Image: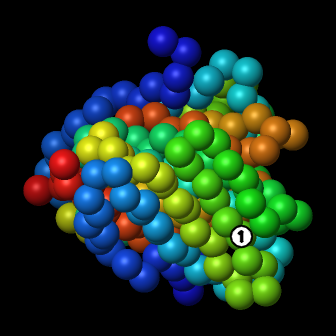
């Protein structure tokens, strides 16, 4: 399978704990995006990378959130001191600069904060 | 501020008829518009796109229409099939950023 993969698919944690999600994009894609989706809403942009550089971060991304993409391959999204409001589906997507730009999404990592 | 809006949360259509999903946007700088389809417990999958320099793009049963003056696009599915039942998201992109609508849940009734 050469699609976008995300791990873990589900995470249940207690408020105040730290969680980390991993995303492996399609190998030749140089852009990688993180989105958050809650029930009844569309995906909300969090941040994106071009290769290893983080080009933009949303205002939604508080200082408890940090994302990295070392070596321009996989990416991690860490949430520190989780709050119940962080419960959501975290989606990763990748794309290739210079194409029509469509995003290819992973299946998402669902976070539940108790 | 929602830059991409889908005002119909749900739509029901009989099998074989046309489904029309609508989307409005506010930012005239968007250069690509896309539709994604999402089944429960899966990530969105790309369906069809259109460049801002075109007004129509067709791919099999799916056609996207763009009206730049009205800042409106629509997705037509004809004929609709039960397997088309899913949530459809409209998206628009500019400068590498993608903005999504809130989705329309389509139900195709056999």
The chain that hosts pointer 1 is: B
- Residue at the front extreme, as displayed: B16
Quadrant in which the C terminus of chain A is drawn: bottom left
Sort mark 1 into few (<14), some (14-19) or many (20+) by Cα contacts within 10 Å: many
Percent coordinates x, y for residue B66 in the rendering: 71, 70
Residue appearing at x 47%, y 52% in the figure: B78
SS label for mark 1: strand
- In the drawing, does residue A80 fall left or right of residue A94? left
Residue for point 20% across, 55% down: B109
Q: Nearer the viewer, residue B90 or A81?
A: B90
**Quadrant in the rendering for residue B12:** bottom left
Of all residues shown, which one is farthest toward the left?
A114
Find disc 1 in the rendering and name its residue. B66
Residue B87: % across, % down:
35, 56
From the top left corner, tell me how far across and down residue B79 is, in percent. Answer: 43, 49
The residue nearer to you, when weighing A12 against A29, is A29
Residue A8's place in the image compared with B84, above or below, is above
Q: Would you say B12 lies left or right of B95 here?
A: left
Can the viewer see residue A77 in this picture? no
Q: Is residue A40 left or right of residue A30?
A: left
Residue beneath the point at 29% across and 63% down:
B13
Where residue B51 sits in the image (x, y, percent)? Answer: 80, 58
Q: Is residue B87 above or below residue B10?
A: above
Horizontally, residue A22 falls left or right of residue A45, namely left
B79, A106: nearer the viewer: B79
């Amino acid at each position: 399978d050469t699609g976008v993969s995300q791990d873990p698919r589900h995470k249940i944690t207690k408020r105040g704990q730290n969680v980390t999600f991993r995303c492996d994009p399609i190998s030749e894609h140089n852009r990688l995006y993180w989105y958050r989706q809650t029930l009844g809403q569309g995906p909300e942009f969090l941040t994106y990378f071009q290769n290893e550089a983080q080009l933009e971060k949303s205002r939604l991304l508080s200082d408890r959130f940090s994302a990295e993409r070392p070596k321009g391959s996989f990416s991690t999204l860490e949430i520190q001191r989780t709050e119940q409001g962080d419960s959501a589906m975290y989606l990763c997507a990748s794309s290739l600069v210079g194409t029509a730009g469509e995003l290819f999404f992973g299946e998402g990592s669902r976070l539940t904060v108790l | 501020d929602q830059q991409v809006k889908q005002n119909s949360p749900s739509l029901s259509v009989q099998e074989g008829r046309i489904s029309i999903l609508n989307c409005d946007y506010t930012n005239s700088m968007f250069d690509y518009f896309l539709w994604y389809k999402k089944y429960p417990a899966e990530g969105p999958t790309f369906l069809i796109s259109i460049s801002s320099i075109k007004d129509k793009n067709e791919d099999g049963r799916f056609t996207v229409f763009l009206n730049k003056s009205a800042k409106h696009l629509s997705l037509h599915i004809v004929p609709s099939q039960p397997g088309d039942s899913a949530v459809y998201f409209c998206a628009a992109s500019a400068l590498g950023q993608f903005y999504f609508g809130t989705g329309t849940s389509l139900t195709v009734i056999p």
